Amino acid sequence: MAGNDLRTMPDSVKEILTAKEVIAINQDSRGLQGYKVFDDGDHEVYNKPLLFKTGLSCSCSELILVYRFRH
């Protein structure tokens, strides 16, 4: 799900949303929802517990920074 108008989406945003790494985080097999750990009004940071499959399974977390553009 994208929170923007797909018809006017810049190529830079499309590249981010269709990046294999971003999709892998979204589709992680652990299936846990990310949650906000920080918000100062301009930046948001989310933590999402992930499951990595590299021979040995280990639980790790991913931090995602969101910057709010102000027009």
Image (cartoon, helix red, strand yellow):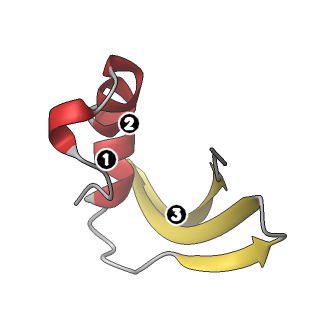
Figure quadrant of residue 35: bottom right
Q: Would you place residue 44 above or below residue 34 in this image?
A: above
Q: Is residue 20 left or right of residue 44?
A: left
Q: Disc 2 vs disc 1: Cβ atoms closer than 8 Å?
A: yes
Nearest the viewer among 2 and 29 is 2
| Gap in angstroms between the C-alphas marked 2 and 1 | 5 Å
Q: Which residue sits at x=30%, y=76%?
A: 31
Which residue has dot 3 on it?
58
Question: Is 12 located above or below residue 67 in the figure?
Answer: above
Quadrant hosting residue 38: bottom right
Q: Residues within 10 Å of mark 2 (few under 14, many from 20)?
A: few
In the rendered image of this protein, does residue 40 appear above or below residue 70? below
Q: Nearer the viewer, mark 2 or mark 3?
A: 2
Where residue 66 appears, x then y in whole percent?
Answer: 62, 53
- Say the numbered circle drawn on residue 69: none
Residue 22 sits in quarter: top left
The residue sitting at 59% across, 63% down in the picture is: 60
Find the residue positioned furthest to the right.
Answer: 40
Residue type pointed to by label 1: Ala
Quadrant placement of the C terminus: top right
Residue identified by numbered label 2? 21
Tell me the number on the disc at residue 24: 1
- Whole-Å distance between the Cαs marked 1 and 3? 16 Å
Question: Which badge, 2 or 3, is on the more N-terminal residue?
Answer: 2
Q: Secondary structure under badge 3?
A: strand
Front in this rendered view, residue 2 or 20? 2
Horizontal side of residue 46 vs 8, given as left or right: right
Residue type beneath disc 3: Cys
